[in-house]
């Protein structure tokens, strides 16, 4: 489930990057850039949480 959220944030970040850096929405480019970086941070946090969850599951299984 957490991987799904991470992938959704990545897709959202890519869409926002296209809007902000592609010149389509010049008037709102600042806000789309901010949302891009926020969703990219959420994606990275999601990946880190997935790795931590996998490590803890392995420790519980082995220990």
Image (tube, rainbow, N blue to C red):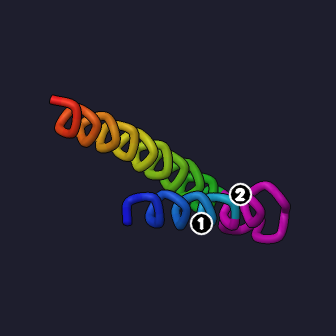
Q: Relative to residue 48, is residue 11 depicted above or below?
A: below
Q: Nearer the viewer, residue 9 or 17?
A: 9
Answer few, some or many: residues within 10 Å of disc 2's Cα (few below 14, many 20 plus, some between 14 and 19).
many
Q: Which element type, helix, strand or loop, lies under badge 2?
A: helix
State the image coordinates of residue 20 (x, y, percent, origin top left). Answer: 73, 59
Establish if 21 lies above or below 56. below
Q: SS for tag 1?
A: helix
What is the x, y in percent for residue 37?
A: 55, 48
Label annotation for residue 36: none
Which residue is under mark 1? 12
52 or 37: nearer the viewer: 52
Q: Position of residue 27 (x, y in %)?
A: 71, 68
Is 26 covered by the magenta stretch?
A: yes
Query: Bounds of the magenta span?
Result: 15-29
Is residue 53 on the magenta stretch? no
Q: Quadrant of the N terminus?
A: bottom left
Which residue appears at 17% of the width and 37% of the height? 60
Give the residue at mark 2.
Answer: 17
Residue sitting at x 76%, y 70%: 25
State the image coordinates of residue 11 (x, y, percent, origin top left): 63, 65
- Check whether the beta carbons of the residues at disc 2 and disc 1 lie within 8 A of each other: no
**Left or right: residue 35 compared with residue 52:** right
């Amino acid at each position: 489930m957490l991987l799904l959220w991470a992938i959704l944030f990545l897709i959202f970040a890519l869409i926002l990057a296209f809007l902000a850096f592609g010149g389509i929405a010049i008037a709102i480019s600042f806000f789309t850039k901010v949302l891009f970086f926020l969703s990219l941070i959420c994606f990275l946090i999601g990946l880190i949480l997935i790795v931590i969850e996998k490590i803890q599951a392995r420790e519980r299984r082995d220990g």
